[in-house]
Image (tube, rainbow, N blue to C red):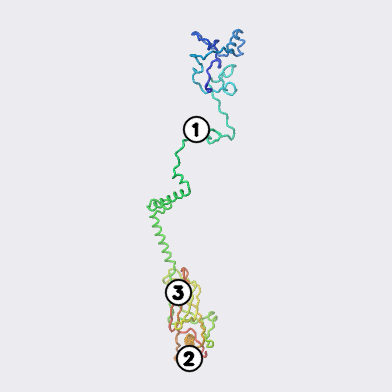
Amino acid sequence: MDYDRKSTVSSFYGGRRGSFDALNHSQSPDYAPSGRPRDDASSFYADQQPRASHDMIQRIIFFAAGRLEPLKGGRDEEEEAPEAQTWDVFADFNNAGPRYSTAFGIGQHQETGYHQLPPPPPPPGAKTEGDTDSVHTPAELVTVPALGPEWQLSEMKNMTKSGRRELESEKRREKWKAWHRGETGMCGKWFTKRFLAFFLFGVAAIIGTILAITIPRVPGLSFNSSTPLLAATGSYNASIPTEFSRYPANFSFPAYADIQVDTTANIIPLTFNYISAQVWDPNTNLQVGTGYFGKDTLPAKIYAKIQVPLNFSYVASNDSDPTWTEWYNACKNVGLYPNGTRPGVNFKLILTMDIAGLPSTQSQSTQVDAAPCPIQLPINAA
């Protein structure tokens, strides 16, 4: 029996029940059930009926004669009843829902149709009907999607670390091909192949221009042809003793190398970190002096003059040494020569320059012949 369907049994809803047994009595054609909407079995109407009729009705209702076999061809009121609205079996008895029976004056001001009770409000924190993920709400099988096909080997490989690396490598190759074809840039639409070529050309031109301006050129050096060596003055002259000695054979004296520096090839001023000098005797190939010039900045596009301090110093075994003899004859007093002319001295000067802006030092050398000695010994010197 469908309990959601409203029962249409007339005796349940107040209709008068016939005083015959439907199982053992065939209905007469002139039989008409009473249309009085009340329940005769109720004790509420007991005083309004004759006692005999009441007793007979009680016996008919509560005494079941029974039947020997199932009724064939009978009439079932519930099966013949039309389909009704959803029916709640507790509607008339739990004092909470609408009532269909008008007995005892209850439900007379309500609609005869059944109204389903509203669902009770959910307790605080409880999941609602929209929470399909609730583990307490059973899911209908019709809502479960059908299972898809099995995963392919390529899909399973793509989930591994090596598969992801291959995908990333493939993306990089595709991006490189697209950039090489000029379809995309390195940064979105920027830095395409053509733009990058012009950009690099411009950067190279700018760098070349900057280097051409800022990189210093190695200057050209030349000596004063008349007086390549100058006598030292000031504190430098006082710091080095001037002497020639025979026993032991040696000599020492200070001097300046008079040098002209060509900076016409430079665009910006030229800076020397230092200049170191070595003086050699080309005849005997022996070193006879050293020098050092400190940091200095020379203007560009000029011929600047500098004086490199030199310290001539040599020690020989005796006064017959050719190097000592050559420098002694060149520096003797001019009064010891009948014609008043002293012989010149030959030397080779090697300059090592450390120029700011260049990665390494630069060296230049020159040889001077018959240069006059920068000092003059006393006439009575040995």
Question: How many C-alpha atoms fall within 10 Å of the one at disc 2: few (<14), some, or many (≥20)?
Answer: some
What label does residue 31 carry, if any? none
Q: Position of residue 56 (x, y in %)?
A: 59, 9
Of labels 1 and 3, earlier in sequence is 1
Q: Is residue 16 visible?
A: no
Q: Nearer the viewer, residue 66 or 286?
A: 66
Q: Quadrant of residue 37?
A: top right
**Which circle, 1 or 3, is nearer the viewer?**
1
Q: Earlier in the sequence, mark 3 or mark 2?
A: 2
Proximity of marks 2 and 1: CB atoms separated by less than 8 Å: no
Q: Nearer the viewer, mark 2 or mark 1?
A: 1
Going by the numbered disc 3, the residue's amino acid type is Ser
Image: 106 above or below 326 = above
Q: Which residue position holds label 2?
A: 336
Three-letter amino acid code at disc 1? Answer: Leu
Q: Quadrant of residue 221?
A: bottom left
Dot label at residue 363: 3
On the image, numbered disc 1 is attached to which residue? 141
| In the image, residue 312 above or below residue 182 | below
**Amino acid of disc 2:** Leu
